[in-house]
């Protein structure tokens, strides 16, 4: 209810302040546009480096994931390699080869 009672005053003072600050906004507009142009140029300059760093990070994360998943299987692979190396020249293996 209080908001409805003070609405005309808020509208009046809001319009008054906006009209008073309009010249300052118009003076600041070129600087705001210059800031936007500088930020856009800097972003276009930095973007390739960020993409390269992101790609390197993704590759390193994938390598770490592969090592984390395959490293626990390394003892089983080593045992299988030793058995294969010992049985490769056995008479049973030579007989099955023909």
Image: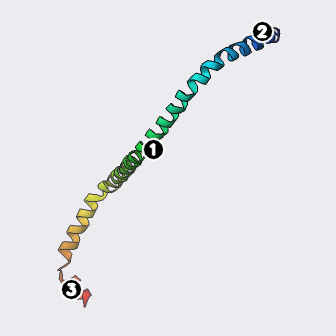
Label 2: how many Cα within 10 Å (few below 14, some 14–19, many 20+)? few
**Which residue is drawn at the image coordinates 21% and 85% (left, top)?**
94
Label 3 element class: helix
Residue holding disc 1: 44
Between the C-alphas of marks 3 and 2, the distance is 103 Å
x then y, percent, for residue 6: 79, 8
Residue 31 falls left or right of residue 61: right
Confirm or deny contact between disc 3 and disc 2 (CB under 8 A). no
In this view, the residue in front, 61 or 44, is 44
Q: Nearer the viewer, residue 56 or 65?
A: 56
Q: Is residue 62 left or right of residue 87?
A: right
Q: CA distance from mark 2 to mark 1?
A: 47 Å
Q: Nearer the viewer, mark 3 or mark 1?
A: 1
96 w.r.t. 82: above or below: below
The N terminus appears in which quarter of the rendering? top right
Q: Residues within 10 Å of mark 3 (few under 14, many from 20)?
A: few
Colour pattern of the rendering = rainbow
Going from N to C along the chain, the mark reached first, 3 or 1, is: 1
The residue beneath circle 2 is 9
In what element is the residue under mark 2?
Answer: helix
Q: Which residue is mark 3?
A: 94
Disc 2 to disc 1: CB gap under 8 Å: no
Q: Quadrant of the C terminus?
A: bottom left
Residue 17 screen position, x and y as percent: 68, 13
**Height in image: 14 above or below 74?**
above
Percent coordinates x, y for residue 30 in the rendering: 55, 29
How packed mark 1 is, by other alpha carbons closer than 10 Å (few <14, some 14-19, many 20 or more), is few
Disc nearer the start of the sequence (2/1): 2
Residue drawn 33% across and 54% down?
63
| Above or below 60: residue 18 | above
Residue drawn 26% across and 87% down? 96
């Amino acid at each position: 209810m209080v908001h409805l009672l003070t609405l005309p005053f808020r509208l009046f003072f809001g319009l008054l302040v906006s009209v008073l600050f309009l010249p300052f906004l118009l003076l600041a507009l070129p600087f705001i546009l210059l800031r936007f142009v500088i930020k856009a140029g800097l972003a276009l300059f930095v973007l390739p480096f960020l993409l390269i760093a992101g790609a390197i990070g993704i590759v390193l994360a994938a390598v770490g994931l592969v090592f984390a998943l395959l490293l626990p299987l390394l003892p089983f692979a080593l045992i299988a390699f030793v058995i294969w190396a010992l049985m490769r020249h056995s008479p049973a293996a030579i007989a099955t080869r023909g």
